[in-house]
Image: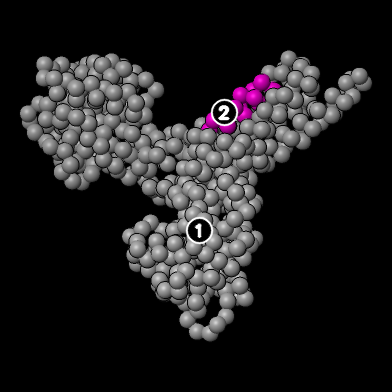
Amino acid sequence: MTTTDTICAICTAPGMGAIAVLRLSGSEAISIADRVFRPAAGRWTLSRQAPRTIHYGTIVDQSGAEVDDVVVSIFRGPRSYTGEDTIEISCHGSTIVQRRVLEALMGAGARMAEPGEFTKRAFVNGKMDLSQAEAVADMIAARSEAARRVAYSQMRGGFSRQLKELRGRLIEFASLVELELDFSEEDVEFADRGELTMLTDEISRVVGRLADSFRLGNAIKEGVPTAIVGAPNAGKSTLLNALLCEERSIVSDIQGTTRDTIEETLSIDDLTFRLIDTAGLRKTDDAIEAEGVRRSQAAAAKAPVVVMMIDATAGEAAARAAADKMRELLRLSGQSLIVALNKSDACAVSPAQWATETWRSEVGADEVVVMSAREGVGVEELKEAMSRAVRGTGRIDDEGVVVTNARHYEALVRAREALLRVRAGLDAGLGGELLSIDIREATDSLASITGEVSSQDVLNNIFRNFCIGK
C-alpha cells in the first residue's frame, strides 16, 4: 500500500440516506477535484480557496457531462483526518450517483482506496497511533452505548497515554541497566535495584489490571453469549419471551417443543447479551430432539454466562438435585452460573426461603434468582444478575480504560510475563545483561499496541478488516 498517490472512496453506506459522502486524499486531491468540479457561480478553482471551507457546484465527468450538484469541503494537510490534502464531496445518496461521482474522480487521476487506507495514512502521518486507529473500526462497529463510549475513549488516546507513560518509565531504567554493560569490568550499578523492583511491581499491577479488563471489554465489544438451559418445561422459552418483551419462542406444555437453539440479542445496562434459548435437556429417542439436546450442551459449554432454569414447584431438595445433575450433564467450568428458580408463583413455600448459600456450595451457583417468567416476576432481578456476572468488579465510565481488542490483550499478557521474569531475576540477583532482555521484551510488547514497534504484516492485517472509505 503506497501513500504517495491520491485515493478516493465512498464513505457512506450505499442507499442508507439522502446524502452520501465521498473522500479524496493525497497530494493531488485538490487538483483532481478541480478537474471534475464546476462552481455554481464564477470561474474560480478549489486550489485557490481557503482550507476548511465549503463550496457548492456541479460534478462533471471526463466528457463534460454533468453528474450531480454537490457540496465540496476542503481540508489541507496536515490539518485533516489523514494528514494529507483532503476533499470531501457530499452528493445525493443514489447508488448510481455515487458510482458516477467515483468514476469521475478515478477518471481524473485518483485510484480506489483499499480497505482502511484513509485511517492507515492517518497512522503513517502521525495523526493517531495504532490503538487509536483500531478504535476507529470499533467505533464504526459499536452496537451498544458502552461499546461506543469505550471506543471513543480509546480514539481520544486515553489508553495510549497510559501505555506510553508506563513504557517511558521502563525505558528509562532499561537504558541504565544496559549502560552498566559498558562498564561491566568496573562492576558498577547505575540502576537502583530497589527502585527497579518497586517499578516492576507497580507496572505489573497496572498491566495486569488492563489485561484482566479484557473479559469485560470483549463482552462490551462482541456481546455476551448467554445460554438459557434447563429441563423440558422449565420455562426457558417463556423467559426468553419475557426478556425480549415479545413472543419470540413457542411456549407449550408439550415437552420437546424447542428442538434447536434460538438466538436473540438483549441490551442490559449498555451491555449486549446474545441470548441462546436451548432445547430441554433430557434423554430422548427422537433423533431430531436428541440433536437439539447436543447443541444445547455445546452452547452451554461455550457461553460465559449460563442461566439455569429450575422448576421450583418440585420442592427444595428435588430442585437442588435436578440443578446438580444438570450442571454435571453440561460439565460447566469457568462460566458464571445463575440459577433461576422459576414458577415461584405456583409454590406452596416461596423459594426465597431456601438457603442461597447451599445452592452456591452444592450446585456452584454464582447467583440464585427467584422468579416467575410467566408472570414477569424476578425478570429485572435476573437482568441485574446477568449484568453483574459480566462486569464483576469492572467499571465503565468516561475516564476508565477497558481493553476490548484481542491483539492488545495478547501484548499485555506478554508484557506481564516479561515483567514477572524481571521481578524473579531481581530476586535471584541476576546481572544486567539478563534483566535487560526481559525489560526490552516488556517495552516492545507495550509498544506493539500503539504501533511504535510493529511489522508490516500486523499493519496489513489490521487495516484489511476496515471498510473501504475509512
Q: Nearer the viewer, residue 395 or 84?
A: 84
Callout 1 environment at 10 Å: few (<14), some (14 to 19), or many (20+)? many
Question: Which residue has dot 1 on it?
Answer: 8
Question: Which residue has dot 2 on it?
Answer: 413
Instruction: Check the image and tell me how it is coloured.
Output: one colour
* x 63%, y 45%: residue: 161
Of the numbered discs 1 and 2, the one sitting upstream in the chain is 1
* x 71%, y 18%: residue: 425
* x 26%, y 40%: residue: 264
Q: Position of residue 386 (x, y in %)?
A: 33, 36
Work out which residue is located at the far right of the displayed protein and give it: 186
Q: Position of residue 135 (x, y in %)?
A: 51, 47
Residue 222: quadrant of the picture: top left
User: Disc 1 on helix, strand or loop?
Assistant: strand
Q: Is residue 326 visible?
A: yes
Q: Is residue 338 visible?
A: no
State left or right for residue 150 relative to residue 449: left
Q: Position of residue 220 (x, y in %)?
A: 42, 41
Q: Is residue 403 above or below residue 123?
A: above
Work out which residue is located at the far bottom of the displayed protein and give it: 42
Residue 251: quadrant of the picture: top left
State left or right for residue 445 relative to residue 368: right
Q: Is residue 250 above or below residue 9?
A: above
- What stretch of residues is rendered in magenta? 409-422
